[in-house]
Image: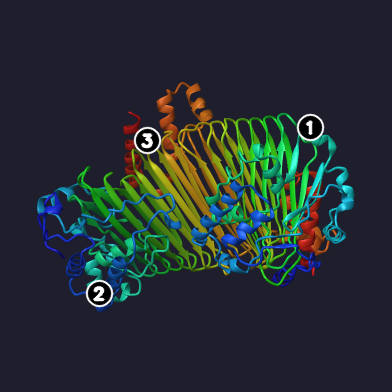
Amino acid sequence: MAQPTLIDNDASESPARPELQHQDAFEQAIAALPDQPDWLIERRQKAWDAFQTLPLPSRKDEQWRFATLNRNVLNQIVPGNGVDAETADRLASRSSFIADHAGQYVFADNQLIDSTPLDPELAEKGVRFVNLETALRDHTDLIEPIFLQAQAELGSEKFVALHKALVTNGTFLFVPRGVEMSKPVVAVYWSSAASTAVFPHTLILAEDNTSVNLVDIFLSDNPEAAGFACSMANIHGGANSRVMRKVVQDWNENTFSFQNDLTIAERDSVVKNVAVNIGALKSRYENMCRIVGPGADVKMYSLTVGEKHQEFDQRTLQVHEAPHATSDLLYKNSLMDECRTIFSGLIVVDDEAQQTDAYQTNRNLLLDHTAEANSLPGLEIKANDVKCSHGATTARLEEEELFYLMARGIPERTAKRLLVFGFFEEIIEKVSNQELAEKIRDIVHHKFTRHQA
Amino acid sequence: MSAEAETLSQIDRDKGNFHYETDYAYDAGVGLTPEVVDYIASVKDEDEWVREFRQKALKVFEKKPMPTHWASEDLNNIVFENIRYYLAKGQQPTRSWDEVPDDVKETFERLGIPENERKFLAGVEAQFDSEAAYSRMKEELEKEGVIFVGSTEGLMKHPDIFRKFFGKVIPIGDNKFSALNSAVFSGGSFIYVPPGVKVRQPLQAYFRINAENFGQFERTLIIADEGAEVTYMEGCTAPKFETSTLHSAVVELVALKNAKIQYITVQNWSDNVFNLVTKRAMAEEGAEVKWIDCNIGSRLTMKYPGVILKGDGARGEVLSIALASDGQHQDTGAKMIHQANNTSSNVISKSISVGEGRATYRGRVHMPKELSNCKNNTECDALLINTNSKTDTYPAITVTGEGNSVQHEASVSKVSAEQIFYMMSRGLDEGQAMSLAVNGFINDLTRHFPMEYSVELKRLIDLEMEGSVG
């Protein structure tokens, strides 16, 4: 692990810190993880080469339709290289997002700053929740087939390559056959120094007949400092596993955020993703799920609360490769001020995947007439015995609902708030962890109320 | 079920597979060059501005890339150098049935344009290859000032009316194929309906391709003046050829204040035709435009009728039916561009994929932020008949503004075994049952169609499903 180093707030004045696109950035990232096996160096080298070669996506690419991507997004950003001891202490003390957890890691600018060991009962049953360095040292056999193997398919090839080349920390959760977790394990990722890139990484390997629960939280130390985040999460749900992964993205509103998640669902697994998107100036979230085993059931839920000039660009892919499986997607966006959202979803049903049930719904609530919602809900169906549908709606609050509440003596502002909270609640209740749901409620309500004031 | 399902895709493609020898008095040869474009302008004796328009369009066409970054790769199989861009008999449009040459009449006979249809059709404009071969209008319509002519005649005799809107709804550079059409267009209809005139009976034109490797590039412009109403019907069939042909039309509709235009198409080109059509309407205040679009034939159809809702309270509608059989890709959809307050639009699309056919819906709904109280409703339903049938849906919706709302829904399903069993237990054979189920699927759309078209459409669908009944 890299030693904590003191970072100037103005990173560009620090000559020892190479920019993201500089060869030294890659070499530092390679050096940051000691004793890497050859296969990993090879994978990262390949990713670095790809990152250097691939062009920045442009709006003309079909997969970036409607998106605004700053041409300078990668400029003057340096890879995060840890925080000083004082910052580490301060951030660690602010990281008790969920008190009732089974283990927690806290990272700041790619450095591990705090951890609560995994519940010994789970550890005894063979569950492992470790950071990447430990995973590479102690569990090479487990992670070699899957670590950094996921490919971007929705347009972010360049950013995924960047992540693979420069990632130095993150978590690996392994749950062996038949073991059930009830409380979640938590990973908190802080972005601290200005103009610094962070690379959160989540790798979940759930063996057959397991029950798995993980929460990722993305936060910024400084509410103003420009940030860059490029994360990846790979979830492997084994046969008959129950996997739940929740991610709360609450970077500050000067951050460029790229999230790339891939779920693989095997036979009869139930995999649930819940994403709450609050922060970032521009957030690009690519979420793919591949159903490879019959009978699997995948849920993809997302709630976004956007304001000011935020842009949330969401691209999803539900691939059904096996028959008798179900997938359900619900992305809800509420938009204030000049905020923009883009939802582009695609359901692909392969010709093998008969008896598929696949659904995709995008609901956009326009709270200001200056906000802009774009929907591109897509279907590609190659099997005939399927039930597939998608729906997209964009509207403001229902006049009738508002009238109903006001007719019962509720003031307009309160009535509006109730309706908006009701809109959020459909996703929040999917979180099914009271404590986390309450935390999310606080955050989204706070953001909405602050705006309404 | 799967064994029977296989046979369902065996559709008789030989229907309409006939072809008459014709000698073409005017032939621009093969390939596309500035000389060919000049030749067309000269043969048609066009004004200088039309010639310049064509030449400019050719340059745009050459510059624009194929839209294969989002559209089917099959487009790359079009060899533009092998296509004839103009040919006609040099006939002037004729006014009475007797003057129509016999061989042309015979072709129409086989196509099933019955002579007695004229009784209730206000006018018949039948296009044989590029030039209007037969054109007739009821006298009372002429008296009311309705102009119904070919594109060449329209631009020459009524430039004051048509030039104002020609190429304005669909500019040359809208897409590669609108540029192509603008360079080499010939044929098509130009219609003007004066203020307040309600044309009670539909105007109709039949199109037909009848030369191997010959692209048909008709151009249609319909203007309904304030408070006017008109319905236009377009149907086409084509004989089967061994190499691909290209059909690339441009249709522009202009509905001025409180006017109503209804445009109905039944497209049944043979399955080697690339049918790449740009259709768009402009609706001014209080105007209403309805596209009814049925695509049954062709190898690849790309067609997304659109309405630009330009005036307050304008209304746009697209009702679309697509039937994709083996070897066919029906890539259809709708565009609704809202540019004024209180505008509303409705899109209902139903597609049926048979055998290895592929049906695609692409849509665009746009509501910018300066607008208020706009509404859009979109519904897309896809029916998949066989295990290897395919369907895609790719809508794109942008909404901002005050009190605007959009809803989009799409569903994919198959004809359920219970439905088929139910009908068969009442004495229908499987083919009839399937045909009935398919007709039931589209019935809530076809009942909005003019009677004769819903009958014709039912007949065409039965014909397509006919081979599937083993």
The answer for how far apart the CA atoms under marks 1 and 3 are is 53 Å
Write down the residue under mark 2.
A41
The answer to whether residue B287 is above or below residue B205 is above
Chain to which mark 1 belongs: B
Question: How many residues crowd around disc 2 within 10 Å: few (fewer than 14), some, or many (20 or more)?
Answer: few
Residue sitting nearer the eye, A318 or A238: A318
Question: How many residues crowd around disc 1 within 10 Å: few (fewer than 14), some, or many (20 or more)?
Answer: some
**Left-right relation of A320 to B30:** left
Helix, strand or loop at label 3? It is loop
Point out the tag, 3 or 2, that comes first from the N-terminus. Answer: 2
Quadrant of res B300: bottom right
Write down the residue under mark 1.
B144
Quadrant of res B314: top right
Write down the residue under mark 3.
A337
Residue drawn where x is 27% and y is 74% of the image: A40
Q: Nearer the viewer, mark 1 or mark 3?
A: 1
